[in-house]
Image (tube, rainbow, N blue to C red):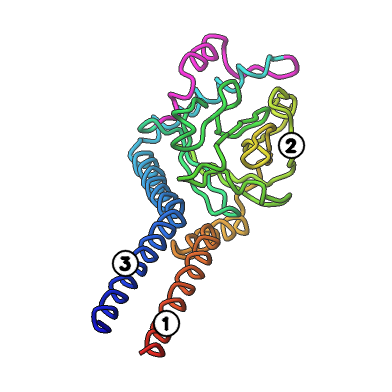
Amino acid sequence: MTQEKNQHNRKKNFIFNLIIVLIFLIGLGVLIYPMVSAVYYDYRASDEVADFNEEAKRLNQDDIDTRIEKAHAYNQSLTGHETLNDFYTEAEEEEGKAMYAQMLEVNEKMGTVEIPKIHQELPIYAGTGESVLQKGVGHLDGTSLPVGGNNTHSVLTAHRGLPDKKLFTNLDDMEIGDIFFVHNINETLAYEVDQIEVIEPSDFEKLRIEEGGDHVTLLTCTPYMINSHRLIVRGHQIDYTPEVQEYHEQGKAPWWMKFFNVYKNYVIGLGIAILFFILWRVWLKKKGKNND
């Protein structure tokens, strides 16, 4: 009778332990899913960035020069000519407007944006439709193309708070003086943050072109997960000096360092969960021995 009771208790304990393990594994899966999916997106984004860079290198310089000229013509068409000298004919400007972004596109991408402070390097696509914002950074139509030059202001926008990718989730970590980089088919442009503000969704005043200015603004929704306003991080172009280049190179950390910096909260949470699980198993074994 005692033997049957012991077998029954073992079977009962086995089922209980199995249920606990299954609950732990399900919880672990829920915990690490955002990290795994975000890591996978980072991998895909890095592929898209590499694809743009490789294809851009295949363009001949004459083609690049022609494309960039048309991009500048497009940008001038946005200024209104109130106080500016005309460098392009009306026909050239109209052609630039009709070709919106096409002159910069390589495999649908018009460039990449690299933000060392938040460990993100992302492809830029034309427009800000949901299909674009689900896969990368969108260029706001009606703002300057990201090729630099006086009287330009390009606005790049991306989501934050998505469960499967970071994008601009940590954009609020940016500070005045931080530097980010925009890569187009011709060159790398460096921008130093000089303005960080929260604005109403309908307020476009801060996104307008300033005479003589060369700006790029990074835009996303805020507050986090509420999205009632817009966070703008504006930078002005600075020379790509050896010091800036050194900062740029230092920002290209090994993948494992980027992984830890971006997903450290998940890693710490996962480590704590595994530690508690191991301690619980050790406690069960000791309890079982004491009962024997």
Q: Is residue 211 left or right of residue 1?
A: right
Marks 3/1: CA–CA distance: 18 Å
**Count of marks overlaid on the render:** 3
**Which residue is rendered at x = 52% and y = 11% of the image?**
94
Please name the amino acid that badge 1 sits on: Val
Relative to 112, say whether 96 is above or below: above
Q: Between tags 2 and 3, which lies in front? A: 3
Instruction: In the rendered structure, find residue 282 and report the number of the disc placed on it.
Output: 1
Residue 76 position within the rendered picture, expressed as x and y whole percent measured from the top left: 61, 20
Residue 201 is drawn in which quadrant? Answer: top right
What stretch of residues is rendered in magenta? 82-105
* Residue beneath disc 3: 15
| Element class at badge 3 | helix
Instruction: In the rendered structure, find residue 125 and report the number of the disc placed on it.
Output: none
In the depicted view, which residue is nearer to us: 245 or 228? 228
Instruction: In the rendered structure, find residue 198 and report the number of the disc placed on it.
Output: 2
| Element class at badge 2 | strand
Relative to 91, say whether 53 is above or below: below
Can residue 216 be seen from the camera position used here? no
Q: Earlier in the sequence, mark 2 or mark 3?
A: 3
**Which residue is rendered at x = 51% and y = 70% of the image?**
272
Relative to 25, say whether 47 is above or below: above
**Which residue is rendered at x = 58% and y = 17% of the image?**
88
Q: Quadrant of the C terminus?
A: bottom left
Label 1 neighbourhood size at 10 Å, few (<14), some (14-19), many (20+)?
Answer: few
Q: Quadrant of the N terminus?
A: bottom left
Marks 1/2: CA–CA distance: 51 Å
